[in-house]
Image (cartoon, helix red, strand yellow):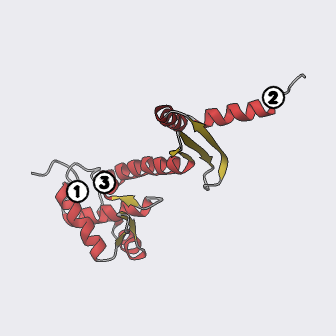
Amino acid sequence: MAQVGFIRNKQEIKYLILYIAERLIAPVPFEAMQELTMCDPAVEFFDFSECLNYLVETQHMTCSEDDLYSITEKGVQNGRACVDEIPYSVRLNADRLTEEYNQRIKRQKQVQSSVTPRGDAFDVLLSFNDDAGAPLWRMELNVPDKKKAKALAKRFQKEPEKLYGELIALLFEQNDE
């Protein structure tokens, strides 16, 4: 049985999917599309899944080889024509969740770290990029222990701005010698 919400039928679910997809800054996996679309408690998983598949079949959405979903021009046009069919409170909630998701996507593009084995040690690549994806700085370290290498990469993900600021301050510090 459907929970109480504002979405009343599958057609409104399709409109909601198109509404959300148009506002995303990058293609997203099924799970993300599901999480964002289920912003109204009346949307059930099987209805959502059926509607998303329908939108792909009718070429309103695409699904890449990597299973990432994005909206097509046809989807944008039809979605804009039907936006008023989505209850206002649902649109507000969808906007909030989509903006939060877009911020996470931006953050993942800005802050990157990886651990790669090399001989008996591990290379840790740390990269901090601007909003356009251009690197502000990149650092590669060789760490002898896998656990420490992963901890270093994880720690970098939390506060790269702090490390960047401290590094810049250290490099510009006046030395009295």
Q: Earlier in the sequence, mark 2 or mark 3?
A: 3
Horizontal relation, residue 3 to residue 83: left or right: left
Residues 68 and 50: in front is: 68
Residues 141 and 87: in front is: 141
Figure quadrant of the C terminus: top right
Q: Earlier in the sequence, mark 3 or mark 1?
A: 1
**Secondary structure under badge 3?**
helix
Front label number (3 vs 1): 3
Q: Which residue is mark 2?
A: 173
The label shown at residue 31 is: 3
Outermost residue, left direction? 1
Marks 2 and 1 in Cβ contact (< 8 Å): no
**Secondary structure under badge 1?**
loop
Q: Which residue is mark 1?
A: 7
CA gap, disc 2 to disc 3? 47 Å
The quarter of the displayed image where residue 162 is located: top right
